[in-house]
Image (cartoon, rainbow, N blue to C red):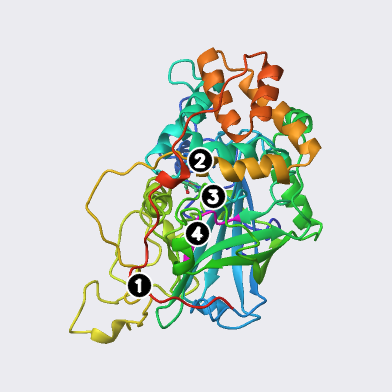
Amino acid sequence: MPSKQVTNNDNAVYTTSNGAPVARPYAAEKVGDHGPLFLQDFHHIDLLAHFDRERIPERVVHAKGAGAHGYFEVTHDITDLTCASLFKKVGNRARTTIRFSTVGGESGSADTARDPRGFAIKIRTDEGNLDWVFNNTPVFFIRDPAKFPHFIHTQKRDPQTHLKDPDMFWDYLSQNPESIHQVAILFSDRGTPDGYHNMHGYSGHAYKFIREDGEWVYVQVHIRADGGFKTLDNATAGKLAGENPDYGIKNLFEAIENKQYPSWTVYVQTMTPEQAESFRYNVLDLTKVWPHKEFPLRPVGKIVLDENPQNYFAEIEQSAFSPSHTVPGIEPSADPIMQSRLFSYPDTHRHRLGVNYQQLPVNAPIVPIANFQRDGLGTFVSQGARPNYQSSISPLSYREKPYSGTHHKHEVWAGHARAYLSEISELDFEQPRQLYTKVFSQTDREHFINNIAGHLGGVKSAEIKARQLSVFAAVDQGLSDAIAKAIGAPTVQPLKVAPASEVVPLRTNIGQKSVPIA
Ligand code: HEM
C-alpha cells in the first residue's frame, strides 16, 4: 500500500542515507580545486553505490506493467459457496492493488503489443492476502505445465541473433495445437486492448470455493469492465506502439488522477464435482471455457481503482502476486498448470525481491504475522520477542485457527504414478470453431484473418506455415484457405487428431457430495 508519510513538499532537509544533512548535493570532496576525490566522502560513495544497485531483475514474463490501488466490495451473498471471511457479509470492503501487464516483452516494450494482458489482483482481507493472478483471456495456450518455458522462450529473443523471430513463435504453436483457442482470441482485436484497464479479467483456471463444512464447488471468476472491453485495431495498435509505447500506463494514471475511476463487476461461474464428471471438457483443462448457458454468471462484487501509486517501483514493481497466496475458503484445483504456478511465483519472488518479499509494504498482509520464519536478507518485521520455535515455555504466543476445508471433503485421487502428457483431440477445435463461426462478426473475422496473415506471413519456413494452416483448417477449412491466400501459401488439409471419444474422462471426486448451486 502507498506510504503516506512522504510528499513532494514536506520541506525535508537533504541528507545522506543515514540522515546526516549535506549542504550541496552536487559537490564532491576533493584535494584542492582539481585534485583526486576522498574515500571518506560518504555522501558521494553512498550516492554512487546506491545507484549501482538500483535495478532488480525484471519479471521473466509480464515485465511491462501498470498498476494502481483501490478496493474490492462484496455486493452479493455467496456464503452458500465459501467460508472466506471476505465474503461473510455483503458490503465488506478490502483494500486492493492491481497490476496489469503485457506478457512477452521487456519492461520497456510497447503497451499496445499483441499479447494477452496480465490482470493481477491483491485483495487484503482480515484472513490474509488473496491474490487473483488472472489474465484478460478466459483460456490459455497450454494445459501441460512443462511446456510453459518452451512457449515463453519462443516469444523471447533468439539465443544467437538476439532478435524476436516469428518462425520460433509459429513453430511452437503449430506443434502444440491445443493453443488454438487462445490463438483465436489473441489474433482477434481482443489481442490489442485499448489501454490496460478497459478490459475484462478471467481466472481461466477452475478454483475451489469451500464452505466451513468442507463442501465445495469448482469456480471460474470473471471480472467484467463496467465500461466494456475496448479494443484497438491492428493498425492503430502498431501506430501507438511507435508513438506512445506507454499508452496503457498513461491512460490508467490519468484516468485515476482525473477521478474517472476504472471499475469492474465480479462474477463467478460454479460447477459441482458431479457436474464436472459429466462436463464435455475436462474442468482442469484451461484451454476450454464453461458455456454461460450451462454455467451462468453470478454477481459477487465490484472492484474500483481510486488511488495511483506514489512510488511506482515500491508499490507496483515490488508487488508480488501468487496464486498460492490464498485464504481459507478459496483453494486451487488440481489443474496441473495451476499447481505448477503455486510453486513458480513465490520461487521467482524470492529471486526477484528476496526471501522476505512478503514483508515489503505493498505485499504485507494487514493482519499480524505469527509463525516461525525468522531473519534473512531484508527483514523488516522480526515478530518481536515471540519464540522462534514451538515453545512450551511460552505456549500462548499464537493461536491455531481451525479450518475444515483442506482436511475433510477434498477430492480422492487414485492411480499409478506416470509421466502424463495430454493428447490433442477433436475437442480442442470445437470452442475455437464456435468462436470463429458464431461469436465473431463479419468484421471480426476479416480483422482476424488480416492479423494472422500479418504475423504468419513473416515466417520464413514453408513447413511451419503449412503446419499452422493445417491447424486452422481443423477449426474451419474456409478460414485456413483465406489465410493461405492472404500469405500466398498453398492450401492444406486439416490436421488429423484423435476422436473425442478417445479422451480420458475426468474422475475427481470419488465418494464425494457437493454443494447445490444457488
Ligand atoms: C507472471 C510463471 C501461467 C498470469 C508470472 C511470473 C512467472 C510466471 C514466473 C513472474 C512473476 C513475478 O516475477 O512476480 C507462470 C508459469 C505458468 C504461468 C510457470 C504456467 C505453468 C499463467 C497463467 C496465467 C498467468 C495461466 C493467467 C491465468 C500471470 C500474471 C503475471 C504472471 C498476471 C504477472 C503478475 C504481476 O503483475 O506481477 N508467471 N505463469 N500465468 N503470470 Fe504466469
Q: Nearer the viewer, mark 1 or mark 4?
A: 4
List the residue tagged with mark 4.
279
- Within 10 Å of disc 1 (Cα), the crowding (few <14, some 14-19, many 20+) is some
Judging from the image, what secondary structure is the residue with disc 4 in?
loop
Instruction: Say what secondary structure mark 1 lies in.
Output: loop
Residue holding disc 3? 288
Q: Can residue 329 be seen from the camera position used here?
A: no
- Up the image or down, 434 lies above or below 268; here it is above
**Mark 2 to mark 3: distance in Å?**
13 Å
Between discs 3 and 4, the one toward the N terminus: 4
User: Where is mark 1, residue-wise?
Assistant: 406
The residue type indicated by label 2 comes to Glu
Q: Position of residue 494 (x, y in %)?
A: 55, 27
Q: Earlier in the sequence, mark 1 or mark 4?
A: 4
Magenta-colored stretch includes residue 371: no
As measured in the structure, the alpha-carbon distance from the residue carrying label 3 to the one carrying label 1 is 26 Å
**Of residues 317 and 452, the one drawn nearer to the viewer in this rendering:** 452
Front: mark 2 or 1: 2
Q: Please state the extent of the stretch shown in magenta in the rendering.
A: 202-208
Q: Please say whether residue 207 is one of the residues in the magenta stretch.
A: yes
Q: CA distance from mark 2 to mark 1?
A: 35 Å
